[in-house]
Image (spheres, grey):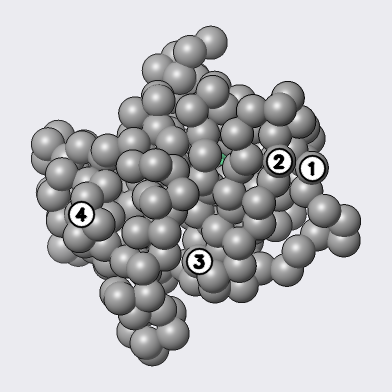
């Protein structure tokens, strides 16, 4: 399928019984502030153009963020931090993400996640991560012709993405490099094309941003470097 078809297909996935139950339960009960809203309550597809050179990989939708709005990192504090930084470095048309129809556009950048359904406590099981791997693999395969940089937010994403890249033919070293903020892997293309750059970045969760472990300046610097490597 093409990317639009893949984005549509993933929203119907029910492969993980625990996550299906949770995402639907959260959508039914709702948080007081959003009680009048209709929650998405389904798997969340990637967001951004099909010819993106940069892919940002997170963890999984937040229960009252993307699981509510249906778009990656949209409608929660993590997204506020991420989109503000993307806008600051010229990769997003506006600094805020509120809903699927807020007019936000990404430039040369796509945001996705290794797990597409909101997990309880933001913690997918290894089995759920493995179930969802095929969706990420197919997405990266479709993006491959233009893909130059993968920005991985957090250790969970790192563990999920490297095997997918390895399976797709990029020579990820063994033992696998450890995750860290600012870690930069350069993977030569097996087909003799362009190198792929993989950048580790602390996740934009409140746990990191409230404590100052990840500051807006650190995030902007890393995204600026991603844009430079991508030739944007
Ligand atoms: Fe399907 Fe992924 Fe959601 Fe599991 S987490 S139900 S594999 S979309």
Q: Is residue 32 left or right of residue 201?
A: left
How far apart marks 4 and 2 lie (CA) works out to 29 Å
In this rendered view, identify the residue nearer to me: 72 or 34. Answer: 72
Picture residue at 64% right of the left edge, 28% below the top? 193
Q: Mark 2 points at which residue?
A: 188
Q: Is residue 54 above or below residue 219?
A: above
Q: Give x and y (percent) for residue 81.
A: 28, 66
Judge depth for marks 2 and 1 and give the one in front. 2
Q: Mark 3 points at which residue?
A: 201
Query: Is there CB contact under 8 Å for labels 3 and 2?
Result: no
Query: Is there CB contact under 8 Å for labels 2 and 1?
Result: yes
For marks 1 and 4 on the same chain, the one whose residue lies earlier in the sequence: 4
Q: Give x and y (percent) for residue 123.
A: 58, 63
Q: Name the residue under label 4.
A: 87
Looking at mark 4, is its residue's CB closer than 8 Å to ligand 1? no
Q: Give x and y (percent) for residue 227.
A: 37, 50
| Mark 4 secondary-structure assignment | helix
Mark 3 Cα within 10 Å, few/some/many (few <14, many 20+)? many
Total marks in image: 4
| Mark 3 secondary-structure assignment | strand
How far apart marks 1 and 3 lie (CA) works out to 21 Å
């Amino acid at each position: 399928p093409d990317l639009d078809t893949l984005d549509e297909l993933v929203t119907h996935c029910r492969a993980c019984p625990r996550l299906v139950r949770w995402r639907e339960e959260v959508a039914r009960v709702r948080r007081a502030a959003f009680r009048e809203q209709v929650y998405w309550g389904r798997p969340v597809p990637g967001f951004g153009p099909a010819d993106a050179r940069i892919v940002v990989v997170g963890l999984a939708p937040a229960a009252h963020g993307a699981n509510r709005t249906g778009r990656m990192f949209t409608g929660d504090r993590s997204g506020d931090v991420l989109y503000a930084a993307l806008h600051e470095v010229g990769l997003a048309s506006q600094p805020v993400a509120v809903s699927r129809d807020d007019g936000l556009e990404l430039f040369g950048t796509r945001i996705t996640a290794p797990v597409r359904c909101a997990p309880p406590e933001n913690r997918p099981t290894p089995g759920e991560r493995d179930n969802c791997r095929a969706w990420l693999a197919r997405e990266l395969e479709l993006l491959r012709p233009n893909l130059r940089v993968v920005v991985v937010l957090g250790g969970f994403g790192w563990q999920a993405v490297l095997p997918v890249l390895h399976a797709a033919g990029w020579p990820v070293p063994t033992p696998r490099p450890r995750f860290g903020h600012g870690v930069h892997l350069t993977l030569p293309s097996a087909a003799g094309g362009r190198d792929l750059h993989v950048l580790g970045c602390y996740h934009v969760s409140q746990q990191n941003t409230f404590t100052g472990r990840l500051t807006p300046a650190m995030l902007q610097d890393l995204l600026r470097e991603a844009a430079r490597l991508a030739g944007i």
